[in-house]
Amino acid sequence: MKQSITLTINGTKSTHEVEPRLLLIHFLRDSMGLTGPHIGCETSICGACTVAVDGKAVKSCAMFAIQADGRDVVTIEGLASNGKLHPIQDAFWEEHGLQCGYCTPGMIMTSRQLLERNPKPSETEIRHGIEGNLCRCTGYQNIVNAVKSAAQKMGV
Amino acid sequence: MATTIAKPESLIGKRIKRKEDPRLITGTATYTDDIQLPGMHHASILRSPYGAARIRGIDISKAVQHPGVVAVFTGADTKDVGPVPCGASLPGLRVPHHYILAIDRTYFAGHPVAVVVATDRYVARDAVDLIEVDWEPLAAVADPEKAIAPGAPAVHPEWPDNTAFTFHQENGEVDKVFAEAEVVVKQRITSQRLIPSPMEPRGVVADYKSGDKTMTIYSSSQIPHLMRNLVAQMLGIADNRLRVVAPEVGGGFGCKLNVYAEEALMGFISMRTGKPVKWIESRRENFLTTIHGRGHVDYFEIAARKDGTILGMKLKLIQDLGAYHQLLTPAIPTLSVLMMPGIYDFKNIRADIVGAFTNCVPTDAYRGAGRPEATHGIERMVDMLAAELKMDPAEIRLKNFVPNEAFPYATATGLTYDSGNYAEPLKKALGIVDYRKLRADQAKARAEGRLMGIGISTYGEICAMGPSPATPAGGWESASVRIEPSGKVTVMTGIKPQGQGEETTFAQIAADELGLSIDDITVLHGDTMVVQYGIGTFGSRATAIGGTALYLALQDLKAKIKKFGGMLLNSEDVSFGGGECVCNKSGKTVALSQIAGASYRAMKLPPNTDPGLVATNFWEPPNFTFPFGAHIAVTEVDRDTGAVQITRYVAVDDCGKIINPMIVTGQVHGGVVQGMGQALFEHGIYDENAQLISGEFMDYTIPKATMVPWIETDHTVTPSPVNPLGVKGVGEAGTIGASPAIVNSVVDALSPLGVKHLDMPLSPESIWKVLQGGRA
C-alpha cells in the first residue's frame, strides 16, 4: 500500500506516493532522477549514498523514503548555486580529491557536515570526519587536502 | 627572414586540473545504474548458497506467478549461450565449460542458477526467494594446497587432481649455483585472496532491437571493444550489430577487465523479452562473484654468496584459480614468474606453477596482477637473505641491482628491461628518511623496549601491456584525432579510463602538439560505435600505448595542417606552432581554425591531399616498459594489542616521463593504500565448506581514512626508449611497492623477538599471537 509523503528536495517541495519499503536512495535516484548519490554497498558502510536530511549527513540506503516525509533533503545536485560550485566541490577539483568519482558526491556531502561542525579541522579530525565514507582510488590524502583547502576558502 | 613563433608554454609536465571532474563533483556523470530506458525491466539473480552442490531440481512456478514478474530463466534456457570466455592459453590447460547459468551442479558459492525479470527491482528480488531449488550439498575444497593433495574433493569431477595446468620455466644453471652457494634461504610466502572492491559494483543494461537485430550493452567495463567481440560470440550475433558502451566507470582495478556471465545473460533476456533489462550487482554479489585477486602460496629459495651476491632463485607457485577460468585467470601467475628476479642481476631461475581449481570464485587480474606477488616474494627473500648475512637491507640491494650500463637488460625470464637507474630512487628515499639517523632512532627505540621497524622495497614492474605477441587479444592501442571545422579537436581513444584521468592527460598531449588550449580538446572513449577498435585500460598501458597512438596520429595531422597552411599562405616554407601556420619568408600567419574550415570547405585542395583533418593511428609497441622505484615504511608495533602503526611512508617512483604530476601522485597514493590494504587489513577468507566468510564490507576491511598514514612522494625520471613520449606507466606501481615495504618493516620491528617472516595481512590479531608466542 503506497503512502503519501511531502518533502523538500534541493529547495523544491513536492508530494509523492511511495511504497513504505522504498529506500530513500532508490526514491531519489529512480523516482526523482537524482543520480548524483550512488549505491555502493546497501549496508550503510560505504557512504556513497550520503545526502543531507534536515542538515545532517545521512546514508540514504539506510533510510526509507517515508522517513523523509516533512523533511528537507539536499543531494549533491543541490550544492552548486546559479552555476557556481560550492567551495567544497571546487576544492575537490583543485586538490585532485577524486579519481573515479563514485564516492565523491557522498564524500562531499559528509565533508560539508564536517566543516559545518568544525570549520578548522586538523588532519586527524578530517580523517575521523570522513571515516564513514570509503574511497578505493585516492588513498584519501588528496581528500584530506581538499577538505583543508575548502575550510580555508570557507573561512575567508 | 624567419619569423619566430611565440610557442606557448608546454602543457607536458604541468599540474592541470582534470577535465572530467566538473561532472563528477556535481553528480551529473552517468554510470551504468544511472541509465533508464523506456520499458526497462530489472533482473535479479538466484545464486548457489553452497560451495559445491548438485541441483536435483528447480521449481520456478511460484516466482513466475508473482505479480510484476515478466520471466524466469534457468540454465536449461541459457545452455546454448556462451560459454563465459577464457582468453588465456597455456599448454595442456584444462578449461571447464563455463555456462552462464548453472545446469545441474554449482561450483562455488555465488554461482548463478536462475534469473528473475520483473518490472521493478524490488519485485525481481522478492521473486528470487520464490524459486525452489532441491539442493544436494557436496564436499567442497577452498584451500589450493589441500585441493591438489590426494583425496581432496574434485572441483570438476572429470579432473580429480584439481590441477588445471602446470607450467615450468628455467634459465641458467640452477642446480649448480644452489649446490655451490654459500648460503641458501628458503621461505613459504603467501599472497592472500583479495577482493578488488571498486566503489561502483558491476552493472549491465542490455537493449535489443528486434527490427534491425541490433543490441546495445552498457556495462561497467575496462575493455568495451574486447567485450563486444566476446559477447557477440556468446550471443551468436554479429559484432557490427553489437554496440558496447562503458559509461562512467566507478573504479575497476582489474576486476572489470573481464567478460562475465551477466553481460551475455542480460543480452539473452533482452532478446527473449524484447525489452531493455538492467542488472546491478549488489555489494554482496560483488564479493561472491566478481573476480578476486592474488591467491598465491609460494615456496621460494634464494642462493647467494657470503658477500650478498645473489646467484639464483627457485619458486614453486601454487595459484588458487577458483572454480573456473575467467578472461585471464591462468595467465596471471605466469606474470609473477616473468618478474620473479625483480631488478636484481642474476640469471639462474627455476619456476614451477601449479594452477589449482578450488570451489571459490575465480581469481584474475587485480591491481598489479601477478607482479605484486613476484615483488613481494623477491623483496621478502632479499630481506631474509640480508638478515641471514647480517647485512643492511639497503646495502644488499645496492650490491645486486642491474647496473645502469646493462640496459637494455635481458632478464633470466626472457624479458628485456628498457631503461633503469635502480640505485637512484633508493638513494633518494634513504636521503628523505635520513636512513642513518633512522637506524640510530631505531636502536634507541629498541633500548627503550619499543618495537620499531624500517622496511625497504625496491620494486620493478612490467607495464604497457604490451606487444601483441605477448597478449591474448592484441596489445596495440588506437587513437583518432578529428579537427572539427571550427578548429576544435575531438580525440577518440581505444583505452577506457576508470578514474585515471586520461581525458586530461590526453588533452594535454593533443593541446601541446597543436598549440591549442586544453579547453579546445574533447576526449571520447568507451563506446564501440563512436570509437575505432581499441584494447582498453589495464596493465598500466593507457598512456604508454594509447598516448603514443595519439601522439603519432597528431604528427600525421600536423603534416596535413602544414599542407593546407602552405596552400592558404601561398608558401612552400611554412611552420606550424602555437595553433597557427606561419610562412617562414613573409611572416604571414593563418590560424588553425581557418585552416580547418578551409580543409572541410575544400574550395581548393593542396596537391595529393584529401579534404578534412582527421588522422587515425594504431600503434604496436616494440616492448613493454619497466617502471621501478623504492618505498620505505617506518612502523611501530604495539606490544599489547599487536596493532601496526605506519609512522612514515616514503615512495620514490620512476615511471618515466610525467605528463601530469598531480595525476601521477594521485595514482601513487591510491596504489600505495591498496598495497597497505593487502599488507595490513584485507583477506578474502573461505571456510572449509568454501563459504566466503569475508563477504561484506563489515568483514572485509578496505582501508578507511583513519587507517592510513600520510604518504610522502617523490620521483626520479628515467625516460623509456620504447615510446616517443618516454612514459612508462604508474597505475599499479604503488600497490606493487607497498606490501613488501610494510611487511619488511614489521618483520624488522619484531626481529629482536626472533621473527623472520610474517604472512599477510598483518592484522593486530596475527601480530598479537606472534607477540604471545615470542617467535614465528
Image (tube, coloured by chain):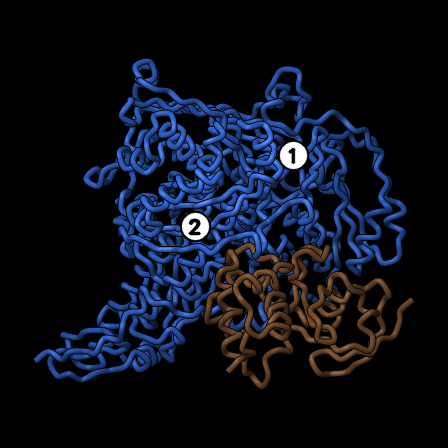
> What's the residue at 63%, 32% (across, down)?
B323
Please name the color used to draw chain A: brown
The numbered mark at residue B730 is: none
Q: Quadrant of residue B642?
A: top right
Residue B699 relative to residue A70: left or right? left
Q: Quadrant of residue A17?
A: bottom right
Disc 2: host chain: B
Q: Is residue B201 visible?
A: yes
- Please identify the quarter of the rendering in which residue A52 is found: bottom right
SS assignment at label 1: loop
- The dot on residue B360 is 1
What residue is drawn where x is 79% and y is 78%?
A: A7
Nearer mark to the viewer, of 1 and 2: 2
Q: Residue at x 29, y 36 (%)?
A: B395
Report helix, strand or loop for mark 2: strand
User: Where is residue B386 drawn, in percent x and y?
Assistant: 35, 30
**The N terminus of chain B lies in quadrant:** bottom left
Gap in angstroms between the C-alphas marked 1 and 2: 35 Å
What x and y, as percent, mark residue B623?
31, 43
